[in-house]
Amino acid sequence: MRHRQAIALLALVGLFVALYLWLHALGFGGAIKCGAAGGCETVQTSQWAVFLGRPVALYGVAGYLAILIVALAALRPAALTQSNWNVMLVSLATVGVLFTAYLTYLELFVIHAICRWCVGSAVIIAAIWIVSLLSLRTPAPRTDPAASQPQPDPRV
Amino acid sequence: MNRFYVVVGVLAVVLAAAVFALLKTGGGASAAAAGPPPTVVDDGFRGYTLGSNTAPVEITEYLDYECPVCATFATIQIPTIKEQLINTGRVRWRFRDYPLPIHKYSRFAAHAAQCAGAQGKFFEMQDQLFYHHQWAQTGKDPAALFRGFARASAVDLTAYDSCMEKGQFAARVEFSRQEGEQRLVDGTPTFYANGTKLFTNFRRLPNSDDFKAVVDSIAAVRH
């Protein structure tokens, strides 16, 4: 359960990072806040900032939203014992990590500029991926009613 | 479990507020560049020109960057006019701003072009504004997009940002608009050839042949 909670919280943070980049790509808010070194504007205005006709950040918003929804769904009491949710989370996180790796490669070797927000998103999705992998190794909590049966008080 | 959802809710609110604050402080179309200046001063500037200073005909175009007809003219007709009349030394083309009040960001766009012009990139920026004219159809704040155009025009962004923030050329843009008003500009684009208004039959989209005819007729009178 702790793994799924951690994934949900990380996905929530990632969602807002991607949301900010997406809204900026749509023209809201003027210059992107990127620190003194800059780099975000170079990345955001490059030809690689658009994928299949949509701003790359939109895929981030969709991805983090999907992970958040699955993680929250997996936290329902009925889902806590089902391990297939962990598999779904690993699958989503793996897609995210691979896409992020591709984007990071473009930043480093093609665009030659680093966007701090993109680095932040890369760290978040990598963390989600690691936590989701760890969740595969953790046994699901037991819900055997007998196991939670109150034991008779020996003093009685 | 309940405490976890409280944490999720609080975190969502905090993050939403942070994104809102980032977007709000990110600038947007600065009022100084997007609106008319408090005072109008003549800085002696009379528009950027294309073509030879000795060309016998000067065409002055009053344009509005948000106007779709101006964009069509700039992208369809101007390349041919450049090739046939400007590059051959027959015409000098002068660009003057005439931001229409019905267009929310045309003054801002004119100002962006002037800020790029201060760095010798007026025509590059003008091409960006006209060739990527989708911005004029969205109604959204184009400040970030224009920065992208400025970058694509090889404009130094630090100087550009400062110019836009200060509204450095707001008075210049307004002076041009008032000049157009005095010359009875009645829409955009409006053209003058050696000071005489052209196409007074409200024809807004003349083509390169129309201008060739105008230049030929002026040349015939001179000979």
Image (cartoon, coloured by chain):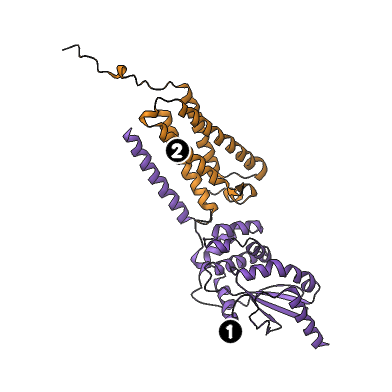
Label the purple chain with its letter: B
Label 2 is placed on what type of residue? Answer: Leu
Q: Is residue B56 visible?
A: no
- Disc number lying in front (1 or 2): 2
- Location of the C terminus of chain B by quadrant is bottom right
Q: State the image coordinates of residue A55 (x, y, percent, origin top left).
A: 57, 49
Q: Is residue A146 above or below residue B213?
A: above
The residues bearing labels 1 and 2 have C-alpha atoms spaced at a distance of: 61 Å
Mark 2 highlights which residue? Answer: A68
Query: Are the residues flagged by discs 1 and 2 in contact, CB closer than 8 Å?
Result: no
SS class of the residue under badge 1? helix
Q: Is residue B219 left or right of residue B75?
A: right
Q: State the image coordinates of residue B33 (x, y, percent, origin top left).
A: 53, 67
Residue sitting at 62 percent across and 46 percent down?
A52
Q: Is residue A6 visible?
A: yes
Dot 2 crowding, Cα within 10 Å, few <14, some 14–19, many 20+ = many
Q: State the image coordinates of residue A97 (x, y, percent, origin top left).
A: 56, 34
Residue sitting at 58 percent across and 51 percent down?
A41
Q: Quarter-wise, where is residue A71 in the image? A: top left
Which is more toward the observer, B186 or B29?
B186
Q: State the image coordinates of residue A118 (x, y, percent, origin top left).
A: 55, 42
Q: Is residue B63 left or right of residue A14?
A: right
Q: Is residue B33 above or below residue A18?
A: below
**Which residue extends farthest left?**
A156
Count of numbered marks: 2
Mark 1 highlights which residue? Answer: B182
Q: Is residue A78 above or below residue B30?
A: above
Q: Check the rendered structure and report the hue given to chain A.
A: orange
The chain letter for the residue carrying disc 1 is B
Q: Are marks 1 and 2 on the same chain?
A: no
